[in-house]
Structure formats: structure tokens, C-alpha cells
Amino acid sequence: MFKISFVGNSNTNKSDRQGHIPQMIVNHISEGSMSSMISWFTSPSNKITSAHFGVSKKGEIYQFVKIEDSAWANGLTNGIENATAELVLKKGKDISPNWYSISIEHEGIWAETKGKLTEAQLEATKWLHKYIIDYVDEKYGHKIEPSRKTIIGHYEIDKKQRPFCPGELFPFQDIIDYLNSQDDLPFKDIKDHWAKDLIIKAYNEGWAKGYPDGTFRPNAQITRAEAIALLMAKEK
């Protein structure tokens, strides 16, 4: 299970959403360390940028700006003609993408990683994307349907100035596949398993529980202790 540490302060740049609701998640690469990201987004010297979230290489998640507010991460600087994202083009040049987006910075340097995430970072950002989607659904009644139209990179907003953000190896499809595999299942690793329906029934009846990371591990070898715990739970 992941946790979010809120580290934004009174110096962190933010503004009102102007009545817009979040409709897309924009991914970035930080071009620096996690510590430098935190320092910059909380510095009184920073008058130009911010982000909603940051994900470290270790899989730590930090929040700088509330989802209800706009972060200063995705605004157009050279006009709509640089954007390739369908939603941005549809909204037009008079509506800032900051008003209807949520931004995630990922610790890394493009020249070193080309946007590839560490394993821990990938798992954390998958979880964070789902957290954001669930939060927006509950708060605004809008479901961000996971696709390359709604899960995008900064380069799709500002192709000219940010052509390598977050990078060509950024795992967009892995994130989208994960989000689309959830389907409100009690465990994230049973969707295509032959015993899925039996596992769901056992879960709903309260005698089968998963692991803290949200998995059931249906193919793992069961220990004696786990077998006893299941039988005892079944008898209750």
C-alpha cells in the first residue's frame, strides 16, 4: 500500500480551476532529483512552476498542490499550434490546460533514462493514477476513462519546448493497461485467472483476504498457516 505525503507550502504555486473539472493526467520527468523537486516547488524563489504530485525512484509519492486547485505545470506558452493532445485541441487556446489537468512529476533525467521508470516508481505511479481517477470520480462525479487521450505526456501539450517530457520510454501503456484491468475487482491480479469468480465469492463472504499490496497471488503455494487461517475464517 502506498501513501501520499503532502509537502506543498505557502510558497507552492497554485491557482483556481476557473470552474473546470480535471479531465486528464499529464506525466512529466523532473530533470533532477526528488529532493531538488521538493526544494523547488516549495521555494519562495519559484514564481513559475509547480505540480500536483511527484513520484521518486524509490516509489515515494509526494503531493504539492491539492487536486481541487490548478498546478502550474501544463500551461501553453507558445500557443495551441504546438499541442497534439486531442483534448487540448478541442478545448482551444483560450482555456489553459492547467485548469482541467492533474500533473505528475517523475524523478529522473531524460538523458539517462529516456523516461523509463524504476520498478518501484512504476508501481507507485500506477497506484497514483488510480487514486487520482477515484478521487475525481468521487469529488466531481466525472470518470477519467484511462486511454492515451486522458493519460498523456507534457510533450503532447508543448511539443516545441518539451519534446522529451516525460520521454519515449515512459510506460504509458503499462499504466493504462493496469487501470483498465481493475474493474472493481477485490484483488488486482485475478482478472484473467480461472478461479476469479470463486475468489470473489470467497472475498464477499468474508473468508478470503489478500495481501497488503492489493494482490491475492492465486498461483502462489499456500502455507499451513494460511490454510488454517482460511479454514478458521470459513467456520466463523
Image: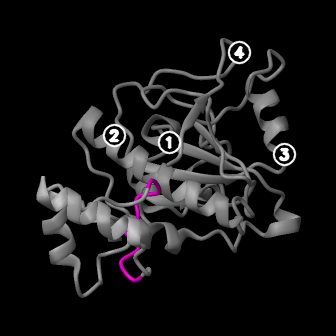
**Given contact means CB atoms under 8 Å apart, are the residues at marks 4 and 3 in contact?**
no
Residue 225 coordinates in the image, percent (x, y): 40, 65
Vertical comparison of 171 with 51: above or below: below
Residue sitting at 43 percent across and 73 percent down?
A: 223
- Res 69 visible: yes
Residue at the spot of label 1: 102
Name the residue type under label 1: Ile
Q: Nearer the viewer, residue 119 or 215?
A: 215
CA separation, marks 2 and 1?
10 Å
Residue 109 coordinates in the image, percent (x, y): 84, 58
Secondary structure character of the magenta stretch overall? loop
Residue at the spot of label 3: 33
CA separation, marks 2 and 3?
28 Å
Residue 50 coordinates in the image, percent (x, y): 67, 32
Query: Reading the chain from its start, which is encountered first: label 4 or label 1?
Result: 4
CA separation, marks 1 and 3?
21 Å
CA separation, marks 4 and 1?
19 Å
Q: Which residues are magenta?
A: 212-219
Quadrant in which residue 207 is drawn: bottom left
Vertical comparison of 168 with 20: above or below: below
Vertical comparison of 144 with 77: above or below: below
**Given contact means CB atoms under 8 Å apart, are the residues at marks 4 and 1 in contact?**
no
Residue at the spot of label 4: 11
Residue neighbourhood size for the residue with mark 2, other residues' Cα within 10 Å, grouped as few (<14), some (14–19), many (≥20): some
Vertical comparison of 43 with 96: above or below: above
Residue at the spot of label 2: 136
Q: Nearer the viewer, residue 218 or 75?
A: 218
CA separation, marks 4 and 3?
20 Å
Which of pointers 2 and 1 indicates the residue nearer the eye? 2
